[in-house]
Image (cartoon, rainbow, N blue to C red):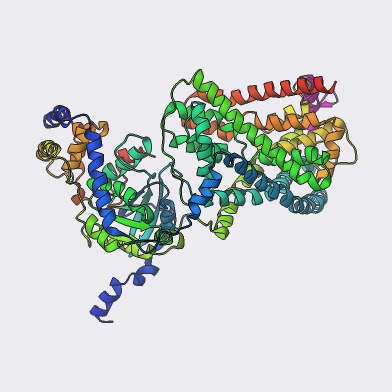
Amino acid sequence: MTAAAESGCEACPAHHTGNLIKLGVNMSSWDFVVALAGNPNTGKSTVFNSLTGLRQHTGNWPGKTVVRAEGGFSYQGSRYKLVDLPGTYSLLSTSTDEEVARDFILFGQPDVTVIVVDASLLERNLNLVLQVLEITDRAVVCLNLIDEAKRHGLAVDDRRLARDLGVPVVPTAARQKTGIPLLTQTISEVATGKVVCKPHRIENHPPALKRTIDQLAGQVVTAFPDLANPRWVALRLLEGDRRITEAIGTGEIGDLNQTAIVGDGSPLSPTAQEAT
Amino acid sequence: MPPPNPTADAIVSSARDLRWEAGGNFHDTLMESIYTDAARIADRAVSRTGEQPRFDLDRTIDGLVTSRWLGFPMMLLMLGVVFWITIEGANVPSAMLATLLIGDLYPVLRDFSASIGLPWWMTGLLVDGMYLAGAWVVAVMLPPMAIFFPLFTLLEDFGYLPRVAFNLDNLFRKSGAHGKQALTMAMGFGCNAAAIVATRVIDSPRERLIAIITNNFALCNGRWPTQILIATIFIGGLAPAHLAGLISAASVVSIAVLGILFTFVVSWGLSRTVLKGEASAFSLELPPYRPPRILQTIYTSVIDRTLIVLWRAVIFAIPAGAAIWLLSNITVSDVSLAEHFINSTGSFGYIIGLNGVILLAYIVAIPANEIVIPTILMLTVLSARITGVGDGPGVMFEPSESVSADVLRAGGWTLLTAVNLMLFSLLHNPCSTTIYTIYKETKSAKWTTVSALLPVALGLIVCFLVAQIWRLLAA
């Protein structure tokens, strides 16, 4: 087979369908950690099950996943640990499930965060997507329930969405297993750095607030030059977020250098573990 | 942990100063920025491909099942239909399983143990005690569960449970509890221990405690078979044959509804006394109705729920079977231990409209509610000295309904005993797994004790009152 033909085949998602090995919960070590976030009742658990081959109970009601579920899969020789976070509408308030999700994305430092959204309720779901993109720059949007959106007479332009959000967008219908191979492929591309995201950051704050944020973010950058998201940290500090203030005080926040993460199979940080 | 670093302190203190400059509506401004961007991006990506369908099925169904007038009747009807299908459908397979496991296999096992020369007490303990208890549980529980769980899971998959929560939300708020308690209560209809874990969706510790303490009033799957069996034998037995199934189903529904009422009353009482406070608001999303994937649902509910619950029941029934056999065969001054207990608690049992057999059965069945009925039948045979059924003391017999009914009537059971047993099965301590889960979740011995004893106390009071009023009216 010629090199050209090989790369042509590799670009086709169908080529790798057979490479997905569902590992269930048999994970002793892993190369990459993938977090699964999203609004309640968007089918996160269904996506989780179709990736890991587990049969975690799914139900058609919001707030079904209370505890963090973990599973794994292997793709193209790399092992991925998948963490199903509780469904939340936002990451800004203080309820337990939102804190679990937020802390894991921030302190657990997943290699990729997959945000599952309901295609038929895109606007409301994007609120969470934008908040996640403020924290991390390695994300994949899983545009789920496209079949349901179609039934409601809605079409979502996933390429346009991907351009606006600055991260890959994969349309899926997880209940029918449509789009899962492409999702696996995209996750691995972001995890290995083949695809680099330029996530959308919220810039439309009023001028006065903008100046305040810039001022504080400047101080944060001086103290922690490696930080990937100083403006977000500044915002959280302004809001008096207890956990973030604590992390600044102990210097824990300085260890969160997103670009330096190498999947080494090491256990998650204690902060992320205690969320279980 | 590194020592507090001076730059960090400076950042935190300047954040504190700047917060004043940012103003009080800072959080709202922030949310507004996010919402504006989300709206803009969504607007550009989404397009309508055609006319919005003129007839919105979801809205129409929601209008019906959450309507002010039809919501509750439809809920009761839905529950009633599920139980009716369960009761009618479980009869035949139950009888077949009983014939196979007890009619055919049991004598074979006895002959086998005799042929290898086991002493009589070994045969008694292993075959008459442990094997029969396990076989009884499988025959009685497997068919109703294999029908009930898939039906319930289908309703759940379809999206009906959040509508139940929506209907009940107002009542929960009025009783000072969290609206999400409706969801955890619905889970309690499956398993109380699982529902106790699910109360984590409730943020306020006060409301979460209320949800935990009152969850036991949701009949769990260990208690459905007891309710269904007693309703079929006594209440359905009084009705004409063609109505028996309907009336039994109706009486099980009323017990379930009574449990919901107790949930409200006790929540109200707790939030006015020891757990004072305001109900917090929450938004409940009504998810779209999704056509359930029937085959997959049946598969997962048989594997995940039915077999797991059945396995647990068998695991607890086997040692309980041994205990029952020993209690019935160890004698002190020519009377067995079981009879000693039954006779000495008989008068107390009479006051609350039950009897010593039931009280002993509930003690034997603390590990698992599922085995209450087998225990009661066996002990009744023993204490009433019925001959012709069973095979000696402590032996469980063929669980066909007519035999069960004969045994219970011969044991002095009346309609009052049946009604009170159904009430007591609703109102008594949670099973040991649930109690352990409550302790793990609350980390408080005090609240665990309250959750365990409050239902028993209520059960004794309710049974006492029912018995007194019943006898007054009957006299």
A145 or B435: which is nearer to us? A145
Q: Residue at x 79, y 44 (%)?
A: B244
> Outermost residue toward the top?
B273
Decide: is B296 above or below A59: below
Residue B157 in the image: x percent, y percent? 52, 51
Q: Quadrant where the N terminus of chain A lies?
A: bottom left
Farthest residue in the bottom direction? A1
Rendered position, B332 above or below A67: above
Please, what is the dominant secondary structure of the magenta stretch? Answer: helix
Residue B289 visible (yes or no): no
Among all residues in the image, which is located at the extreme right?
A: B387
Which quadrant of the structure image shows residue B457?
top right
The span picked out in magenta is B328-347
Q: Quadrant of residue B131?
A: top right
Position of residue B56 in the picture relative to residue A28 (left or right) = right
Of B45 and A19, the residue lying toward us? B45
Residue A57 shown left or right of residue A251 in the figure: right
Percent position of residue B181, x then y: 50, 34
* Residue at the image point whose x is 37% and y is 47% from the top: A39
Residue B32 locus on image (x, y percent): 24, 41
Residue A138 located within the stretch drawn in magenta: no
Q: Nearer the viewer, residue B137 or B65?
A: B65
| Relative height, residue B454 to residue B258 (above, below) | above
Say whether residue B330 is magenta: yes
Quadrant of res B395 = top right
Give x and y (percent) for residue B409.
85, 34
Quadrant containing the C terminus of chain A in the rendered view? top left
